[in-house]
Each structure stands twice: as structure tokens, then as C-alpha cells.
Amino acid sequence: MATAQSSPPPVTDERSTEVVSGPSAGVKYAAEAIGTFFLVFTVGAAVGTGSHLAPLAIGAVLMVMVYAGGHISGGHYNPAVTLSVLVRRRIAVGDAFMYWIVQLGAGLLAAAVVSGIVDPAQAAKTVTMPLTGHALVAAFVAELLFTFALCYVVLNVATSKDHPDNSFYGLAIGFTVLAGAVAVGGISGGAFNPAVVLGGAVMGLFPWTALIYLVAELLAGVAAGLAFRALNPDDK
């Protein structure tokens, strides 16, 4: 979407994600662009080259990018996470829109880079799952559930006032994606992120019908934000 006591504050605590003194808007948008770029690039390169360790690589790069940029932008790198943080009222509407623009733009840029460096013959071996009928419904549900899990984890480990200074937020977020990729990667492809879906479709990792995932992921982001507020009524 966020550290030890001597490190900067968590990803989206009261001092980092909302409209506060600290990093300028441009710096926050740049941090989001960098983190999202490397996340989508890793997805494309790992899956496109047929690496059996793709889920681990994707979870790991998200973890390290969250640790790297969390103190600057909140380390969302995911429009669904940004939406959940908006519903949770920890980011301004204008900032949220700009985050969405840079996240999707960075995802498209990463897709272009992957397409330019991954051997087309090797990438062609990647099997794009058919998404019709029951398979599409199953994939939609899988994306909805694990995107909710990801957003819910981000809100609880990176924005809760009960965890003002922790060192586990990046691990928790990265391992959520790793768990989801292993659990439902064979069902939906394990995107859990509109920027990954869009970039993946451009790279040929997802069929264009997978754009329906965007609906599931955005619904999950809203649901996670509302769930956090319902379960933490005193955490404003």
C-alpha cells in the first residue's frame, strides 16, 4: 500500500499518508511510481520467464518496496489499497486520484519494459488462463477475497494507532500477497491490484476479460476500509 523504533514512522500512520507536513506531493507520487513500477515489473519478468519462484519474488519485492517508500508515500503501490485508505479517511481525495494516476502509469511503463526485455519466445510459453463461465466467476471471487485481505492487513498493520512504531508491517503485507499468489494463483492469476491487472493484460499475462477483476478489487478496497472503521470505531 509501513519500522523499528529508530526508523521512520509506519506506512500510513497519522504522520505519513494524510495531508501532513513532510514529503511534498511530488515526492510522494514519485515514491508510489517507483514502488508500483518494480512490483509490476517483477510480476511480468518472473511470470513471463516461467520462474517457479514467482509468488515469492512478487511478495518479496512488495515487502522491500513498502519498507523503502512507506515513510514517504505510505507505500500503497496499489489503487485498491489507496481506495481502502481513502475510505479509512487517511488520505485526501486529491492525493488519492494522483496516486491512482501514477500507479496505473507506472504499471503500464513496467509492462512496456518487460515486453522489451523478456524473450518473446519464452514469454509465449506463458499460458494465459481462459476466463469464461464458472472460471471467470471463481477468479472474480478469488480476487475479491484476497484483495480484501491485502487491504485489511495494510490498514491494520500500517495505519492503526495501536501499531504506531512497528517493524512487521512490510513482512505482513508482502506475505499476504505471497499467500494469495500460492492459494489462488492458479484460479485468478493472483493480481490483487488494478495496476498489476492492467499491466498484466498489456503483457499478455491476463486475457482482457480479466479487467473485470478491477470491479472485484475496488469493491474489496471499499469493504476493507469500512470493515476497519467498524472494528476500530475509536481509531479516527
Image: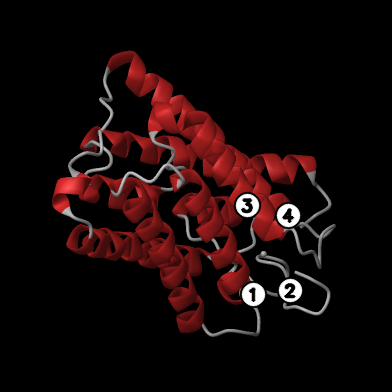
Label 2 vs 4, first from the N-terminus: 2
Type of amino acid under label 3: Ile
Looking at the image, the residue that sits furthest to the left is: 121
Type of amino acid under label 1: His
Instruction: Determine the residue positioned at 31% across, 64% down.
Output: 105
Label 4 vs 3, first from the N-terminus: 4
Q: Mark 1 packing: few (<14 Cα in 10 Å), some, or many (20+)?
A: many
Q: What residue sits right under mark 4 in the picture?
A: 157
Type of amino acid under label 4: Val
Q: Secondary structure at mark 3?
A: helix
Q: Secondary structure at mark 1?
A: helix
Q: Mark 4 packing: few (<14 Cα in 10 Å), some, or many (20+)?
A: many
Label 2 vs 3, first from the N-terminus: 2
Q: Mark 3 packing: few (<14 Cα in 10 Å), some, or many (20+)?
A: many
Residue 104 place in picture, x, y as percent = 34, 59
Label 4 vs 1, first from the N-terminus: 1
Residue 232 place in picture, x, y as percent = 79, 46
Q: CA distance from mark 1 to mark 3?
A: 15 Å
Q: What residue sits right under mark 2 in the picture?
A: 9
Q: Quadrant of the C terminus?
A: bottom right
Question: Nearest the camera: 236 or 52?
Answer: 52
Residue 33 place in picture, x, y as percent = 41, 70
Answer with left or right where residue 73 lies relative to residue 8: left
